[in-house]
Image (cartoon, rainbow, N blue to C red):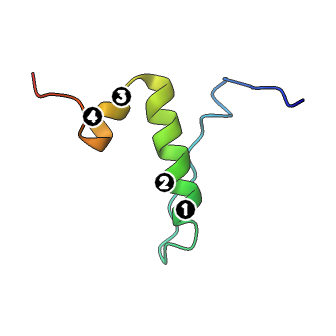
Amino acid sequence: MSSVKLGEDYVRVPKLEVGGANWVLYKERLAWAADVKGVLGHLDGTSKEP
């Protein structure tokens, strides 16, 4: 069984490489970090405008 670490190190989003070689990892980490912070709806457009 794996453990889940919700510290700042685990939520770290890697810098997107110029050529986009790490796009998949970047996109997944960015979405996960936004979800943890409670702002994913703003990122993916599912939150309604105020």
What residue do we see at 52% from left, 38% from top? 32
Residue for point 58% across, 52% down: 14
N-term-proximal mark, 4 vs 1: 1
Specify the farthest residue to the bottom: 19
Give yes or no for contact between labels 4 and 3 (Cβ–Cβ under 8 Å): yes
- The CA span between labels 4 and 3 is 5 Å
**Which tag, 3 or 1, sits closer to the chain's start?**
1
* Mark 1 nearby-residue class (10 Å; few <14, some 14–19, many ≥20): few
Amino acid at the residue labelled 2: Lys
Question: What residue would you read off at disc 2?
Answer: 27
* Numbered disc 4: secondary structure: helix
Label 1: which residue? 24
Q: Quadrant of the rendered structure where residue 3 is?
A: top right
| Label 4 Cα neighbours within 10 Å, binned few <14 / some 14-19 / many ≥20 | few
Tell me if label 2 and label 4 are in contact, CB under 8 Å: no
Tell me the SS state at disc 3: loop
Which residue is outermost to the left?
50
Sooner in the amino-acid sequence: mark 2 or mark 3 = 2
> Element at badge 2?
helix
The first of marks 2 and 4 along the sequence is 2
Q: Amino acid at mark 4?
A: His
> What percent of the width, then of the height, locates residue 15?
53, 56
Residue 41: x %, y % from top left: 31, 32
Which of the image's four quarters has the C terminus? top left
- The three-letter amino acid code for the residue at tag 1 is Val
Label 3 sits on residue: 39
Callout 2–callout 1 Cβ contact below 8 Å:
yes
Q: Which mark is residue 42?
A: 4
Q: Three-letter amino acid code at disc 3? A: Val
Q: Tell me if label 3 and label 1 are in contact, CB under 8 Å.
A: no
- Quarter of the figure that contains the N terminus: top right
